[in-house]
Image (cartoon, grey):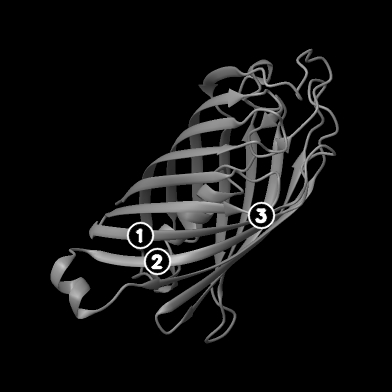
Amino acid sequence: MRIPFVTNWFTLLAAVLTLQAPLLHAQPPEEHSRFISQNIALGAYYSRGDYDQAADTSIYYYPVSYDLSVDSWRFKITVPHLKVSGSGSVLVNIGGIGRGDFETDFRTDERFTAKGIGDITVSASYQFAPLFKGAPFMDITAEVKIPTADENKNLGTGKTDYALQLDLYQVFEQSTVFSTLGYRKREQSLLFEDLQDSLFVSLGITRPLAGDWLKKHLSGQWSYGLLYDYREPASLYSKETHELMPFISWTPAHNWTVMTYAVKGFTRDSADKAVGTQLSYRW
């Protein structure tokens, strides 16, 4: 099951929401001045799917994130609340998985519901200036997943994960193309069997909505885009995922942004349907 997390949808959404950040950072500051900005975001996500199990699994995910940018550095923390209702065989951000000491037969239609705090994630990113005129902006991010989710409730693995990723942003007239290449290392869990490290790749594009009708009938700035996401299996019991995410973003005021999106999966480890939204305030 794929849901927003530091190395998945919410990080990519945050990147889209702050695509102007590279341009701001690229401007040379005045002498003795520093570029400093802060951002807080509230998100909501819902998904439902069978993930090749007898019973469907529903996910409700509500993350709160805060990030601080200082010159070329960006530090971020995300604290989510999570509710899972299903067969017990689907782990957040992993998919169908076996459990070493869990007695429930995952192929039955028995359902359980659990909720609580999810795994907290912290990350640090550094943005490099373009190597030459016309070159893309580049970020390198190191992230740690802190195992705060209760593994006995099937809300997490109970172990720490580490990830390293490279993000590229390039502007072509009114379009902005962005991509991610990353690798996640997972600590082995006694409760969940056969976790494995995995590669993830994403590619997306965003463009502003324009036109006389839009300017006349809609306030603020609007943009839309499409994101493709690929991930290797996170365990021997899960499969690789291929997903598409169309999204639309609205900036009603200078500091506020609202984004709404849907997710279409193409493998059994993707939800049958998924939607989400995120409200962001930057100062």
CA distance for labels 3 and 2: 22 Å
Nearer to the camera, 250 or 127: 250
Q: Which of marks 2 and 1 is nearer the N terminus?
A: 2
227 versus 177 height, above or below: above
Residue name at image x 51 percent, y 27 percent? 82
Q: Which of marks 3 and 2 is nearer the N terminus?
A: 2
Nearer to the camera, 128 or 16: 16
Q: Earlier in the sequence, mark 3 or mark 1?
A: 1
Q: Where is residue 104 in the image (x, y as percent from the top left)?
A: 75, 15
* Element class at badge 3: loop
Q: Which amino acid does label 1 sit on?
A: Ser
The residue that disc 3 covers is: 266
4 versus 111 height, above or below: below
Q: Position of residue 225 (x, y in %)?
A: 45, 66
How busy is the neighbourhood of tag 3: few (under 14 within 10 Å), some, or many (20 plus)? few
Residue name at image x 18 percent, y 65 percent? 218
Q: Which mark is residue 224?
A: 2
Q: Judge from the rendering whether residue 135 lies leftward or rightward of residue 62; answer left or right.
A: right
Query: Is residue 35 visible from the viewing direction of this image?
Result: no
Q: Judge from the rendering whether residue 277 lies leftward or rightward of residue 236; answer left or right.
A: left
User: Image quarter for residue 216?
Assistant: bottom left
* Element class at badge 2: strand
User: Image quarter for residue 186?
Assistant: top right
107 versus 102 height, above or below: below
In the rendered image, the residue lying farthest to the left is: 216
Q: Which amino acid does label 3 sit on?
A: Phe
2 and 1 marks in contact (CB < 8 Å): yes
Q: Which mark is residue 249?
A: 1
Q: Judge from the rendering whether residue 147 lies leftward or rightward of residue 114; answer left or right.
A: right
Q: Where is residue 177 in the image (x, y as percent from the top left)?
A: 52, 73
